[in-house]
Image: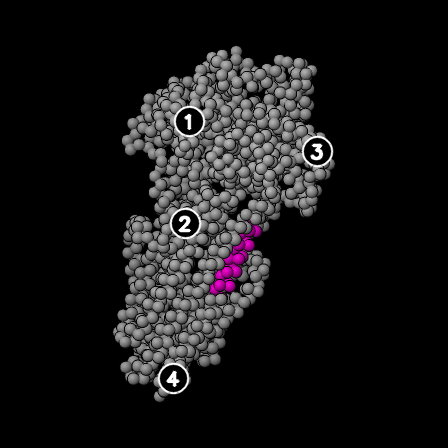
Amino acid sequence: MLKDYSLLHLLPYLGKYRWKVGIGFVMVACTVAAGMVSPWILKYVVDDIQAAFAPEKLPRYAALILGISAVEGFFRFWMRRILIGVSRDIEFDLRNDFFSHLQKMSLSFFQAHSTGDIMSRATNDLNAVRSVLGPGIMYSVTTLVTVIAAGLILFRLNWKLTLFACVPLMLASIGVKTVGRQIHDRFEVIQEQFSRISARAQENLAGIRVVKAFAREESETSEFQRLNEEYVRRSASLIRLWGIFYPMMSALIGLSAVALLWYGGRMVVAGQLSLGEFVAFLSYLSILTWPTIAAGWVINIFQRGAASMERILRILRTAPGIRSDTPPGDPWSALGAIEIRNLSYRYPGSVRPVLKEISLHVPAGSTLAIVGQTGSGKSTLANLIPRLFDPPPGTIFVDGRDVHSWPLADLRRLIGYVPQETFLFSDTIRANIAFGMAGEIPDAQLEWAAGVSAIAEDIQTFPEGFKTFVGERGITLSGGQKQRVALSRALAKSPKILILDDAFSSVDTYTEEKILQGFRQAMRDRTTILISHRVSTVKEADHIVVMRDGAIVERGTHESLMATGGAYSDLYHKQLLEEELATA
Amino acid sequence: MATDLREEQVLGKAYDARLMRRLLGYLRPYRRDVVIAFVYIMAGSALSVLPPWLTKVAIDRYIRTSELSGLNAIAILYVLALLGTFLFSYGQTWVLNLMGQRIMFDLRMQIFRHLQKLDVAFFDKNPVGRLMTRVTTDVDALNELFTAGVISVFGDIFTLAGIVVILFLLNFKLALAIFSVIPLLFLVTFVFKIKVRESFRRVRTAIARINSFLQENISGTPVVQSFVQEGRQHRRFTEINREHLDANLQSIFYYALFYPLLELVGALAVAIVVWYGGLKVFEGSLTIGALVAFVQYSDRFFRPISDLSEKYTILQGAMASSERIFKLLDTPPGIESPPEPKAATVTQGTVEFRNVSFAYHPGEPVLHDVSFEVRRGEKVALVGATGAGKSTIISLLSRFYDVSSGQILVDGTDVREYSLQGLRRSIGAVLQDVFLFSGSVAENIRLGNSGISHGDLEKAAETVHAAGFVRRLPQRYETEIGERGSSLSVGQKQLLAFARALAYDPRILVLDEATSSIDTETELLIREALERLLEGRTCIIIAHRLSTIQNADRILVLHRGRVRESGRHQELLKQKGIYWKLYQLQYKDQLASVGSMVQERESGEKP
């Protein structure tokens, strides 16, 4: 068991509850000790009956048996309540830690791990670990204490007989050890497959519209079936192995009883053992039966738990790609000037650079527009400023200070970011817009943000206005409405820097124009980075850069770029050409 | 977090005959296994009851009479009984667990298949996280019922029966005396049952909420991080997590109380044996061996009973899970192929909306009395502000939803008369949110249709100019793209979606705002490709940029769910209506910036 180091990582968690665990163990000892008394009473009963005895002693024995059981029950109650309770406490802590760790992970982590996979670690694996902490620990300690206590008593009663009866028990522990490792390995392979199944189902359900649009229900089903068949196959190989455990345990303990019957019977006949002692022996053995059987089960729990803990640790051990050691301060005095110096970037694990030697200066309060082809690196640049992906040190500066030396929270609070793909929470519209705000949220602020984003009118038509509930991922809103809610969310926290990554793509031009008008007011003292491919969106910007293949190929104002007649004016003319062609 | 949509409905009672019957139905394909397991269990139980009796015989007949040869025989019998018990219980575990796995497989497949059949409106209402719980956790709960529950219950019952018989044979009166504690046993179990049910429900509700919350936060990480809301989300999570903890602690309390009480009842039985049985030994009507056997049996007697109550917990879990699973399975697909479709596939590609009205939610109509016709090979553009109902029209055409009133006809036949597969295969769709599956680029274009050869998909990618960036990927078409294509840019994803639609070679092509996220340059390339693609196909385009639809054969202007204007670009402009307004806004803007750049610079006017 100790070979599975992953479980050692639970020690700090247990440490937090060391007093409870300690008391729980004392309860185990008391429970076991109380349980050891009954066979001894039985010995007296039998020996007394053997000798000519007074039947008036019998009620006393009966009362003793009941009393001892009540005492044992009292201890057992507390043992269970404390030890199983601790396992739930630790489950709570572990789940919290898991969640807060996930929150620290950078986006590249979520690109590498599917949601289904992470979910199955947070549910199935956590459950398996919980079983180690609860029943696993409780039963293994009970077993250990019971074996020691019963062993000592039996040894004092008759050491020869004890040795004779213990041989099968030794065999049991050897068997447990050899098969245990195998179970661990097979279980791990099963969990992996289960992750695959979850991930597949998850994806299918999330993409059900595509599946339906392409009438791919059948091929999806057969793929799902294939994964499930493999799961059954892998499970069968585990069942074959651990199915032998319980039966083997009870058979071995049974062999001990046979040994006792055969050898002990001879000793009684030879007068070396009283019949009462013989019966007590039998009784102690039967006390040992359950813990020994439980041992097999406990081993199983530990093996599964170790495999699961490893899977959880693989996530917990992944160092957050992005962190800051500086404690947060007050970001509100910041001005919001952005400077980018000679920034080149490639995604972790990739060789191709997505950004090449980008240098930019965005004075506080000004608007920078970035236009460029799909995949030219615009969104990457936008992600690097709030450090959703991490830029190399000494490349991006806010107010002259390297983003790496900014407290991460301050930096992000400063920035209002509207990502290309809208994500809303299944909560009310109000909660979604107020998402970035702390404390008491004035309605006026929300209404202002909604107004500027041109979503206020839509919200009024909703049945419960701002309190209207948005379905999972905002499914009941149209794409444009979702995008506008995301816009107001970024505005509502009144950021110093606003980054709009193609934030009008699902909004029609009429509404976009309306929003931009409002925005120009709102942006007056804010630095804005506007990413778009619509010239109409960007031409009012103070500064426009054109990107291609990760590099800046042109920079200037709308007028100067038009005058130089490069890529920007090309783009502009192309957009215009379409119009002209159509009207011709 | 708001609760309306997330709250798991935890319904139901602990035992429901109707549910149970239905659950047992899943055993039907495994009748043979059930019978074998049954035989193993009976044989195993019968053998497992023997040892105390063998002990009794050994004590009374051989040990007390010093007959050691008989002791050998007993030892051999004992070993044989153990061996038999071992083999039978191993066989039983093997058969039952494998069967449990197969039933889980059947159930998962059934749920999955059913989910594939359910309509889009269902998925609007049910979060993915909740449905995932059905496929994973709930199915697991049923596995326990089949492996550890429903059949091995008979093992317990059989063991009990065996013990009862032996005890009566050993001594009728003493047996009756110890059975007198049974009502007490039932009382304890009954009270426990009621108490634990409540906390059990709380646990289930809490875990479902935890899962939904977690799921959503994993998907929304970029938003949480860029808005620095880790702290708040963590507090919310802790809250939900705490509720789960409290619910569990409550149920632990009841369990912790229950087991010792059961043992106390068992001790009462032993006390009766010692007192009353001891008296009988004294009187000479009971042997010492029988007394010892009684003690051993009463221990064995109570174990299956406490097992039974453990099984009750399993049963409870299974009932709750199966109720939810069956509720899902019983949800009729709102939209199904007719039993005898009048048409299998679309051959012409004409589309007609006839007085179509539609509402996602009753009382909130999205489309009012919409009528229009699209001829074969015609290109129709849908124009209108966001939320005007354009996407809805597309969804209705593919029959993702059914019209509230009116009719949609494809090739003159109501879409409801088509087989769903046939209809949807004939309609190529590029939807608003491009959804990619994890898997290779090729798999995403092919989407499991083995009819599309590698050549076909390369050609499709080439035509929509997706081939360019695919070639730059490390393993080209075999490159694995992350979950939801997270390693690709939005524009690249759309190119793939185009290639996907093209590879399927549909009669009718539907583009839903698909061009909006691609830069002008790429879009021009695509349009060029699309023009070739549109040849001979009926096409319905939703695009916010008016320029992309100006060469449409006809434009339908939607406003608040009604078709307000319809005609060619020039005709519509002349009407000076809604279209004119939308058009002016963009066109004037662009015209102004080119034609009168000098003017603009001088005046410094800001629109």
**Residue visible at 36% across and 85% down in the picture:** A56
The residue tagged 3 is: A337
Amino acid at pointer 2: Val
Mark 1 and mark 3 in contact? Answer it, CB < 8 Å.
no
Work out whether B233 lies above or below B42: above
Rendered location of residue B122, percent (x, y): 40, 38
Magenta segment range?
A: A79-99
Q: CA distance from mark 1 to mark 4?
A: 91 Å
Nearest the eye: B300 or A59? A59
1 vs 3, front mark: 1
Q: CA distance from mark 3 to mark 4?
A: 95 Å
The residue tagged 2 is: B10
Mark 3, secondary structure of its residue: loop
Numbered label tally? 4
Amino acid at pointer 3: Ala
2 vs 3, front mark: 2
Rendered location of residue A393, percent (x, y): 69, 39
Mark found first going from the N terminus, 1 or 2: 2
